[in-house]
Amino acid sequence: MKTPAMLTLCGSVARVYEAPTGVDKKTGEAYGGGWRVQLLAEIPLANGEARLDLVTLSTDLPEKFKAFVGKWVRVPVGAYSLKAGAVGFFCLKGVEPEPLANA
């Protein structure tokens, strides 16, 4: 039995796209590329309201996400630290999105 992910994100699949590539003019290093999926997620607020937030994740299974555009899914994710205390997320390798019923 596979161990469940510690973190999951839920949201409506808004878009699946391939990120452009480029080369840093100063260092000559290549950057970018790879597939991304954007989820529109509801973030609960302390006053009982909710705000919408667009979360962009890297993925190695773009075709699996394309099948769910406009539908709600649950996605096991990993997290990493960004500048200014923000958090970034990525889809775990080889893990497919799970459709959410009644969403």
Image (cartoon, helix red, strand yellow):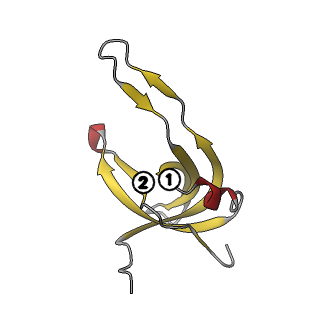
Q: Give the camera-side residue of 79 and 26.
A: 26
- The quadrant holding residue 29 is top left
Helix, strand, or loop for circle 1?
A: strand
Q: Position of residue 49 (x, y in %)?
A: 55, 62
Q: Which residue occupies 54% across, 46% down?
A: 36
- Identify residue type, mark 2: Phe
54 w.r.t. 12: above or below: above
Q: Position of residue 38 (x, y in %)?
A: 57, 49
Residue under pointer 2? 90
Sooner in the amino-acid sequence: mark 1 or mark 2: 1
Residue 59, label in figure:
1
Q: Position of residue 75 (x, y in %)?
A: 50, 66
Q: In the image, is 15 to the left or to the right of 1?
A: right
Outermost residue toward the bottom? 1
Q: In the image, is 6 to the left or to the right of 41?
A: left
Dot 1 and dot 2 residues touching (CB under 8 Å): yes
Which quadrant is home to the C terminus? bottom right
Q: Give the camera-side residue of 102 and 34.
A: 34
Q: Give the camera-side residue of 95 and 45.
A: 95
